[in-house]
């Protein structure tokens, strides 16, 4: 049988992480991405941060929400290597953790909108749109569901025990 048309499996038969999962994680960790990008500026390190987050409290909230996304990205890296068996049960439940991060980001977005007295802001609307599409993707994606259930205990057994 030829399975070359199935592009979401790697060479070992494990499901590859979906590209949109990486996009969701970058979206949730956007505060950290901006912070790292601001470190590359030599003359004014806080200029880039002020461009995206004019208020310091919004930047702090973005960093807080982004910590979980960085942890999920670490779990994705651990799943690809499949060497840290201790992280396997945490990885299998990371879909719930992703839901919690999306809800937390939604709460922070609502807090920012309320703080600006419900005045329209293109940044808030883009955040809300991407948050909406992320929630629909996490809710409906079969591939993401299969990906989070792919790392089983049998994957880490030695070859002699199989």
Image: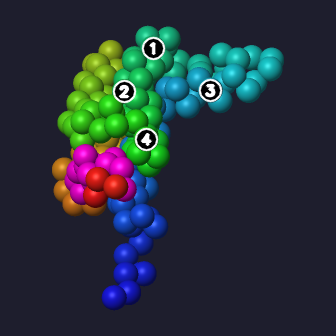
Residue at image mark 1: 60
Q: Nearer the viewer, residue 122 or 141?
A: 141
CB of mark 1 within 8 Å of CB of mark 2?
no
Residue 36: which numbered mark, if any?
Answer: 3
Instruction: Judge whether 28 appears above or below 149 on screen.
Output: above
Above or below residue 20? Residue 8 is below
Separation (CA) of disc 3 from disc 2: 17 Å
Q: CA distance from mark 3 to mark 4?
A: 28 Å
Q: Residue at x 22, y 60 (%)?
A: 142
Q: Which residues are magenta?
A: 144-159
The numbered mark at residue 68 is 2
Q: Position of residue 57 (x, y in %)?
A: 44, 11
| Quadrant position of the C terminus in the picture | bottom left
In percent of the image, x 41 and y 72: which residue is there? 7
- Residue 125: give x, y in percent of width and height: 36, 39
Give the spatial CA distance, label 1 vs label 3.
Answer: 14 Å
Q: Nearer the viewer, mark 1 or mark 2?
A: 2
Counting residues from the N terminus, which is met first, the one under dot 4 or under dot 1?
1
Q: Say which label, 1 or 3, has the lower sequence index.
A: 3
The residue shown at (62%, 26%) is 36
Please identify, in this view, whether the residue under mark 1 or under mark 3 is nearer the observer.
3
C-alpha distance separating marks 4 and 1: 34 Å
How many neighbours does mark 3 have within 10 angstroms: few (below 14), some (14-19), or many (20 or more)?
few
Q: Secondary structure at mark 1?
A: helix
Q: Are marks 1 and 3 in contact (CB under 8 Å)?
A: no
Helix, strand or loop at label 2? It is: helix
Based on the picture, tell me whether residue 35 belongs to the magenta stretch.
Answer: no
The percent position of residue 63, horizontal first and vertical second, equals 45, 20
Which of pointers 4 and 1 indicates the residue nearer the eye?
Answer: 4
The crowding category of the residue bearing disc 4, from other C-alpha atoms within 10 Å (few below 14, some 14 to 19, many at least 20), is few
Find out whether the residues at labels 4 and 2 contact each other: C-beta distance under 8 Å: no
């Amino acid at each position: 049988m030829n399975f070359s048309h199935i592009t979401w499996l790697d060479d070992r038969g494990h499901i590859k992480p979906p590209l949109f999962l990486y996009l969701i994680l970058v979206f949730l960790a956007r505060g950290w991405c901006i912070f790292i990008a601001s470190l590359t500026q030599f003359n004014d390190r806080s200029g880039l941060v002020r461009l995206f987050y004019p208020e310091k409290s919004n930047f702090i909230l973005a960093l807080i929400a982004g910590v979980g996304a960085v942890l999920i990205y670490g779990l994705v890296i651990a799943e690809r290597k499949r060497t840290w068996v201790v992280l396997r049960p945490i990885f299998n439940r990371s879909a719930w953790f992703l839901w919690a991060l999306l809800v937390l980001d939604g709460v922070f977005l609502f807090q920012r909108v309320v703080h600006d007295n419900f005045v329209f802001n293109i940044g808030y609307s883009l955040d809300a749109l991407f948050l909406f599409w992320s929630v629909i993707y996490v809710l409906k994606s079969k591939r993401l569901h299969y990906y989070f259930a792919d790392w089983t205990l049998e994957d880490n057994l030695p070859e002699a025990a199989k």
